[in-house]
Image: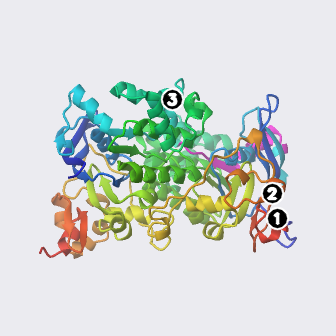
C-alpha cells in the first residue's frame, strides 16, 4: 500500500491580484522508503504542495492521505499527522532558535508530541544518526557555535527524533556550500536505508534529483506535467518543459540550451488549454501546428497520461499523447 | 605566479600580492592572503569558491568598495595605474567608466520609490557629463534595450519588474558609462534556473559584443565552466588552482577543485547516480589556519609533508597552476 496519497489536490490563495491557484489538481503517491524529487521553477506551487502534505496548509479541494487514511484538520489529527510527516526547511539558520541549545532544539518535538521514554537517549540517538558524533559534545552548544552543515544536521535530527515515516525537505541543501551539500545528501540516502523513511525533496536542482531520487515529478504552474523514474525523466524527458529545464543545466554540454522566454507565469491567470502552451517551444516553432495538435494545445486542458513505451512514466502533453496509439 | 613573457600585451588588470584583512585592531581576520592574477582586454575570468573563501572581499578590493575597517595591501593595476593608490576624485572617475560591478540581490540595490529610468538617468548624468538633456533618456532606452528590456520599462518602479528583469536593469546600469571591465559578484545566485540561464546568456552576449573583460564570481563551478575562458579557484583566501575553464572543471589538479567539481553531478552519468559526493568538515577559521596547506584537514589526498610544506601555485600543465604538493611542478617529494 502506498504511504502517501495526494488526490486531485487544489490550494488557492486570494489576494489583490485575484485568486491564485497555487496547486491546481495534483495527484501523487509515495511508497515507504522512496525518495521523490519534486522539481520546478519558483512560483510553480511546489512549496505550497509540500506544506499542504505536511498539514501546514489546508487544501481548497482534494485530499492528502497517509496509508489510505485521509488527513482531517482538527487539532488532534493534525498533531498525529505531523508526528509522522516532518518538514525540513531550506535555511537551517533561520529554522533554529538562536537562544536554544542543540539539545533543546532536538528535544522540542519529543515534548510537543509527549513521546515516552528517555528523552536524553532519544536525542543522543537522533544526533548521532544525523552524523553529529559523539552527540553529547553537541548537547550544550548553540547554533552559532556550529557550521551551516552541522545546523542542517541538527534540523534533520530534530525531524528524525520522532521516527517519522515521511520527511518533506524543501531545498534542503540550497543554502549550503557545495562541498557540504554532498554530505547532507549522503545522509538522506543513509536515513532511508536505515529507517525506511520516505523523503519528498522539493528542489529546483535537477542534479540533486540525479544524486538521490528514485522518482522525479516536474511541476509547472500548479500541476505535475511529467512524472516517472529518475532515469526516464532526466535522461529521456518527454514533456517540452522538462526538456527545456534540463537543457539549461550547465553540465549538459551536448544539448543546445532552450532558454524559455519570460519567467514562470502567474498562478492568478492560468492559461486555457495546456497551461504551458504560451511558452512551449513546440507551439512557438510551429511543430505543434505541423503535428496538427496546435488547436488542442491552445484550447484543451489535459491530465497526466501513461506513455506506451515507458512503464510508470506519466506525461501531460498533447504531442506525447498524440504520438501514442492506445492499446 | 610565473612571470608573464614580455611579448604578451600588457593586461587590462594586473593584481599582485593582494591582501585583505578585517578587524586589524581586535585580532586580525585575513580574508584574502596574497592573490595574483592578470586579465587581458575582453577576457573572462571565473572566480570560484565557497562562502568565506575571500572571493567577495577580493571583488570589493578591486573597486575599493570594502568597509572602512578593511585593510587592503598589494596592487591592483588597471592599465598600469594602481587603483589602491588613486585619489578619491580619480577613483570616482574610474568607477563606472573603466570598471563596474553587478552584485547579487538585485531587489535591494534599486531604490523602490524611484522609477527605473530616473535611477539610470541619475547615474548617467553623474558619470558621463557629456551626456545631457534629452540624450539622457535616449541613453536610458538604449541601455534597457541592450539588456533585452523594452525602453518603456523606464517608466516602471522596481517592484513592477521580476527578479530577472531587475538583474537586467542592474547590468544595464553597470554598463551605463561603457566600462571595459565588469565584475559580476554572484549575479545569478538568487535567480531561478531558467532566468539564470537567460541572464548568463545576456552576459555572454554583451561580453562578446562589447569586448568586455569580465570577472565572474560564484560558488557554482559548473556555471563558470560554461561562461568563462579561465577559472581560478579560491580556498581560505588564496587561489589554489587556475587554468583554462574546461580543463580545470573536467580534470582538476587540486583535490579541492576535484571535490567542488564532483559536487555538481553530471545528469545521466552513472558515476553520480545515487552517489552524492561531498567533503567532510568545513572550511577553516581564517584566524586559526592549519600549518602547511590550509586544505590539509579535509583533503583526501593529504600526506605527511602537507603539514610542513608552505604551498604555492606550482605549474600543473600548460597554462595551468595548482597549489598542491601532488602536482608535478611542485618539486616536493611526496
Residue drawn where x is 60% and y is 66% of the image: B208
Residue B35: % across, % down: 78, 53
Residue B325: % across, % down: 79, 63
Residue drawn where x is 18% and y is 72% of the image: A322
Image height of A214 relative to B155, above or below: below
Proximity of marks 1 and 3: CB atoms separated by less than 8 Å: no
Residue B79's tag is: 2
Q: Residue furthest top?
A: A99
Image height of A9 relative to A56, above or below: below
Proximity of marks 2 and 1: CB atoms separated by less than 8 Å: yes
Can residue A56 be spotted in the picture?
no
**Residue under label 3:** A103
Q: Quadrant of residue A291?
A: bottom left
Nearer to us of marks 1 and 3 is 3
Which class describes the residues within 10 Å of circle 3: few (<14), some (14-19), or many (20+)? many
**Residue under label 1:** B10
Q: Quadrant of residue A76?
A: top left
Q: Which residues are magenta?
A: B85-105
Which class describes the residues within 10 Å of circle 2: few (<14), some (14-19), or many (20+)? some
Colouring of the image: rainbow
Answer whether residue A9 is magenta in the image.
Answer: no
Residue B125: % across, % down: 63, 41
Amino acid at each position: 500500500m502506498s504511504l502517501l496519497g495526494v488526490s486531485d489536490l487544489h490550494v488557492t490563495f486570494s489576494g489583490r491580484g485575484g485568486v491564485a491557484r497555487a496547486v491546481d489538481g495534483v495527484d501523487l503517491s509515495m511508497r515507504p522508503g522512496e525518495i521523490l524529487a519534486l522539481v520546478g521553477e519558483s512560483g510553480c506551487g511546489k512549496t505550497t504542495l509540500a506544506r499542504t502534505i505536511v498539514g501546514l496548509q489546508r487544501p481548497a479541494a482534494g485530499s492528502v492521505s497517509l496509508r489510505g487514511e485521509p488527513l482531517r484538520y482538527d487539532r488532534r489529527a493534525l498533531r498525529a499527522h505531523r508526528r509522522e510527516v516532518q518538514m525540513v526547511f531550506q535555511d537551517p539558520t533561520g529554522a533554529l532558535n538562536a537562544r536554544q541549545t542543540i539539545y533543546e532544539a532536538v528535544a522540542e518535538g519529543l515534548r510537543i508530541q509527549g513521546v515516552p521514554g528517555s528523552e536524553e537517549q532519544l536525542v543522543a540517538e537522533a544526533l548521532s544518526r544525523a552524523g553529529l558524533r559523539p552527540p553529547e559534545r553537541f548537547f550544550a552548544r548553540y547554533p552559532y557555535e556550529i557550521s551551516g552543515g552541522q545546523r542542517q544536521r541538527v534540523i534533520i535530527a530534530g525531524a528524525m527524533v520522532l521516527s517519522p515515516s515521511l520527511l518533506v525537505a524543501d531545498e534542503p541543501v540550497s543554502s549550503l556550500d557545495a562541498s557540504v551539500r554532498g554530505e547532507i545528501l549522503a545522509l538522506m540516502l543513509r536515513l532511508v536505508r536505515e529507517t525506511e523513511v520516505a523523503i519528498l525533496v522539493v528542489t529546483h536542482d535537477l542534479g540533486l534529483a540525479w544524486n538521490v531520487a528514485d522518482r522525479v515529478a516536474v511541476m509547472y504552474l500548479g500541476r505535475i506535467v511529467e512524472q516517472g523514474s529518475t532515469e526516464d525523466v532526466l535522461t529521456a524527458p518527454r514533456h517540452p518543459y522538462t526538456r527545456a529545464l534540463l537543457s539549461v543545466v550547465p553540465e549538459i554540454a551536448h544539448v543546445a540550451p532552450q532558454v524559455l522566454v519570460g519567467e514562470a507565469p502567474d498562478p492568478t491567470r492560468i492559461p486555457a488549454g495546456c497551461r504551458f502552451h504560451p511558452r512551449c517551444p513546440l507551439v512557438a516553432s510551429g511543430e505543434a501546428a505541423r503535428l496538427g495538435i496546435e488547436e488542442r494545445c491552445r484550447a484543451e486542458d489535459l491530465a497526466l497520461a501513461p506513455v506506451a513505451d515507458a512503464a510508470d512514466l506519466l506525461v501531460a502533453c498533447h504531442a506525447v499523447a498524440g504520438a501514442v496509439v492506445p492499446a | 605566479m610565473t612571470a608573464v613573457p614580455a611579448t604578451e600585451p600588457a593586461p587590462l588588470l594586473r593584481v599582485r600580492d593582494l591582501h585583505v584583512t578585517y578587524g586589524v585592531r581586535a585580532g586580525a581576520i585575513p580574508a584574502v592572503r596574497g592573490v595574483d592574477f592578470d586579465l587581458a582586454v575582453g577576457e573572462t575570468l571565473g572566480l570560484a569558491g565557497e562562502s568565506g573563501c575571500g572571493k567577495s572581499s577580493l571583488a570589493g578590493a578591486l573597486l575599493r568598495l570594502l568597509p572602512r575597517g578593511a585593510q587592503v595591501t598589494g596592487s591592483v593595476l588597471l592599465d598600469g595605474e594602481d587603483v589602491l593608490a588613486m585619489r578619491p576624485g580619480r577613483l570616482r572617475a574610474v568607477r563606472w567608466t573603466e570598471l563596474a560591478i553587478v552584485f547579487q540581490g538585485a531587489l535591494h540595490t534599486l531604490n523602490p520609490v524611484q522609477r527605473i529610468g530616473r535611477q539610470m538617468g541619475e547615474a548617467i548624468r553623474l558619470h558621463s557629463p557629456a551626456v545631457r538633456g534629452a540624450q539622457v533618456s535616449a541613453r536610458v532606452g538604449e541601455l534597457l534595450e541592450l539588456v533585452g528590456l523594452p525602453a518603456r520599462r523606464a517608466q516602471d518602479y522596481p517592484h513592477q519588474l521580476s527578479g530577472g528583469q531587475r538583474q537586467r536593469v542592474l547590468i544595464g546600469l553597470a554598463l551605463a558609462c561603457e566600462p571595459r571591465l565588469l565584475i559580476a559578484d554572484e549575479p545569478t545566485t538568487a535567480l531561478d534556473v531558467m532566468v539564470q540561464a537567460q541572464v548568463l546568456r545576456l552576459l555572454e552576449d554583451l561580453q562578446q559584443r562589447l569586448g568586455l573583460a569580465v570577472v565572474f564570481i560564484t560558488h557554482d563551478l559548473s556555471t563558470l565552466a560554461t561562461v568563462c575562458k579561465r577559472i581560478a579557484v579560491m580556498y581560505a583566501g588564496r587561489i589554489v588552482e587556475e587554468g583554462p575553464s574546461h580543463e580545470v572543471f573536467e580534470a582538476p589538479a587540486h583535490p579541492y577543485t576535484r571535490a567542488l567539481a564532483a559536487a555538481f553531478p553530471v545528469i545521466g552519468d552513472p558515476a553520480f547516480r545515487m552517489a552524492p559526493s561531498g567533503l567532510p568538515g568545513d572550511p577553516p577559521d581564517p584566524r586559526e589556519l592549519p600549518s602547511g596547506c590550509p586544505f590539509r584537514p579535509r583533503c583526501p589526498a593529504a600526506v605527511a609533508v602537507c603539514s610542513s610544506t608552505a604551498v604555492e601555485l606550482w605549474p600543473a600543465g600548460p597554462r595551468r597552476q595548482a597549489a598542491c604538493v601532488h602536482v608535478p611542478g611542485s618539486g616536493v617529494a611526496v
